[in-house]
Image: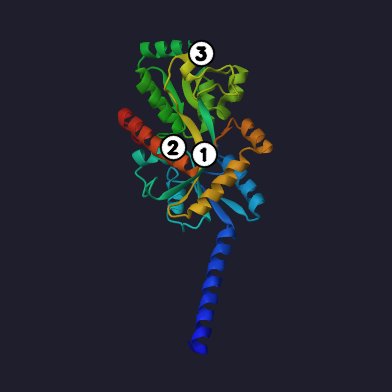
Amino acid sequence: MTDCSVAAMRALTLCMLLAIAGSATGQQAYPAKPIRFIVPYPPAGSTDPMARMTAQKLASKWGQPVIVDNRPGGNTIIGTEAVAKAAPDGYTILLVSPIFVASPSLLHPPYDAVKDFAAVATIGKTQIVLVLNARVPANNLKEFIALAKTKPGQLNFGTTGVGGIVHLSGELFNIMTGTKLQHIPYKGAVPLMADLIGAQVDLSFQTIIATISHIKSGKLKAIAITGETRSASLPQVPTYAEAGLPGYGVAAWFGIVAPAGTPKAIVDKISSEVAAILVMPDILDYMAKQGVEPFVSTPEQFAALIKSELAMYADIIKVANVKLD
């Protein structure tokens, strides 16, 4: 072999080693620039605190900004579509909640909730509590179901809009109990809560944080809550199973997805970091005050939850014949 050939081979080998080293360094360096954390809701909504809490901790851990980017509109479609079309490099992630799995059957968005996204991590969940205004003559779930069956279409439940978890919780209740509660959508939580307390609307299926102060003050009666065990925030409220309706299980959860094709090493890194955040004492305290329980899962477990709830909400929407106005 000539000296020129030997020199050429050495140069080629050196280039290959540098390329491999550069690739390994690039993988280890993630994140090497700011991350956009898109929230498809307005600022200061019920989901926003979960995103900001997580973003702050990730930024502190990684030494890179994690920028919460609120992209509301189109019943979450605008922000969600932006992430579906983003580069799958780990620098754009999305906060999701049950509307992510309900909207495909109701809104027919321009993306596939399974094929266009990689499940990353769950953050937290909050149970749904059934609250009645103080004038409804029922003090437990069995009494309420009996009352509702004697008044088909006469008792109404308020929600913050068609197709959300609060609405679909009520429709599932109708399906499972054979009742006919009338749906009344409101344009926001404030007017809904005012009318619920004022007895212009009979009941609602609500998150703990939205109702806990009114329950404790006696303005609303809480008669059942989802979950396998009672909530530490409302220990006096029985679960649906305890109250006589086993199998009724709807919860509002919060999680993170990324564009499909995001490298598994990056997905796993974000997932493990989120899991570590969810055992920090200050985070546990903060979440408890929000009425939210830590919810840790692997990417694979979260992907299975998404598929399961896609089917569940599709069934509810079909059976209840839910349609947008």
Q: Which residue is drawn at 47% across and 25% down?
A: 205
| Residue holding disc 3 | 135
What x and y, as percent, mark residue 245? 43, 17
Q: Is mark 2 on a helix, strand or loop?
A: helix
N-terminal of the two: label 3 or label 2? 3
Asked if residue 67 lies left or right of residue 251, the reply is right
Please say if 315 is above or below 43: above
What x and y, as percent, mark residue 216? 62, 19
Type of amino acid under label 2: Leu
Q: Residue at x 51, y 53 (%)?
A: 265
| Residue holding disc 2 | 305
Type of amino acid under label 1: Ser
Foreground residue among 274 and 249 = 274
Type of amino acid under label 3: Arg
Which disc number belongs to residue 32?
Answer: none
Q: What element carries label 3?
A: loop
**How many labels were placed on the picture?**
3
- Calculate the distance from the C-alpha at mark 3 to the C-alpha at mark 2: 38 Å
- Mark in the foreground, 1 or 3: 1
| Residue holding disc 1 | 297
Please say if 91 is above or below 214: below
